[in-house]
Image (cartoon, rainbow, N blue to C red):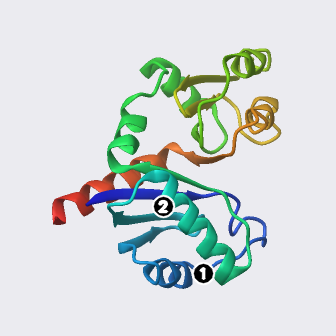
Amino acid sequence: MNVWIALLRGINVGGKNKIKMADLREALASIGLRDIQTYIQSGNILFKSDEDEAMLRGRVERQIEAVFGLQIKVMLRTAEEMRAIAASCPFTAEQLAQAAASAQGESLYVSMMLEEPKADQLEKLRSFETEEEIFGSKGRDLYLLFYQTVRNSKLAVKADKLGVHATVRNWNTINKLVSLADAMEAEA
């Protein structure tokens, strides 16, 4: 049985698309997902299932719409894929340290997409890089590093417009999800 991480886009942000995590766990348990746990209120759900990604995504999205009346895009990653995200950061230790020292708030984020963006879209995104905002990509995942702040970032806005559904998490959340997934796998 695989450990999956579902990442919901745009819930409990700015008072919109409110879903209580206890209600979400209950709704997902009712469609047969197992050992469900959530992490913080922004729609990070870990669970076990033998289904494939496309089937799971469809079932979770339909259940959220049926129970909560919300059309929410869901990105899914296996525990193994989430570990690979954490292990594949394209930035050097020096870049990360400099950004962490100078940034207001978090400096490193990962945009997880439903599918890999097209090469020409990534090339267009390059034109929005500055000394204070850079990115790297690996498959369906886009790493964003901010030396000042993600707020009012042109790069972040353009990254959200790659033509691919995506949701973004900060680096601390990525690592916490890896830790939680590792613990779930160890229980098996």
Looking at the picture, which amino acid does disc 1 mark?
Lys
Looking at the picture, which amino acid does disc 2 mark?
Leu
Residue where numbered disc 2 is placed: 56
Q: Quadrant of the N terminus?
A: bottom left
Give the SS element for disc 1. Answer: loop
Location of residue 73 with respect to 115 vertically, above or below? below
**Distance CA(mark 2)–CA(mark 1):** 21 Å
Q: Is residue 35 left or right of residue 63?
A: left
Q: Depth check: 181 or 40 in front?
A: 181
Q: Quadrant of the C terminus?
A: bottom left
x%, y% of residue 97? 49, 26
Write down the quadrant of residue 29 in the picture. bottom left
Write down the quadrant of residue 109 in the picture. top right
x%, y% of residue 28? 49, 77
In front of the other: label 2 or label 1?
2
Residue at (57% x, 62% y) in the render:
58
What is the number of the mark on residue 20? Answer: 1
Location of residue 6 with respect to 59 vertically, above or below? above
Write down the quadrant of residue 152 in the picture. top right
x%, y% of residue 142? 59, 31
Give the class, few, some or many, for how many residues have Cα within 10 Å of label 1's Cα (few <14, many ≥20): some
Give the SS element for disc 2. Answer: helix
x%, y% of residue 75? 56, 52
Residue at (55% x, 34% y) in the render:
140
Residue at (44% x, 57% y) in the render:
5
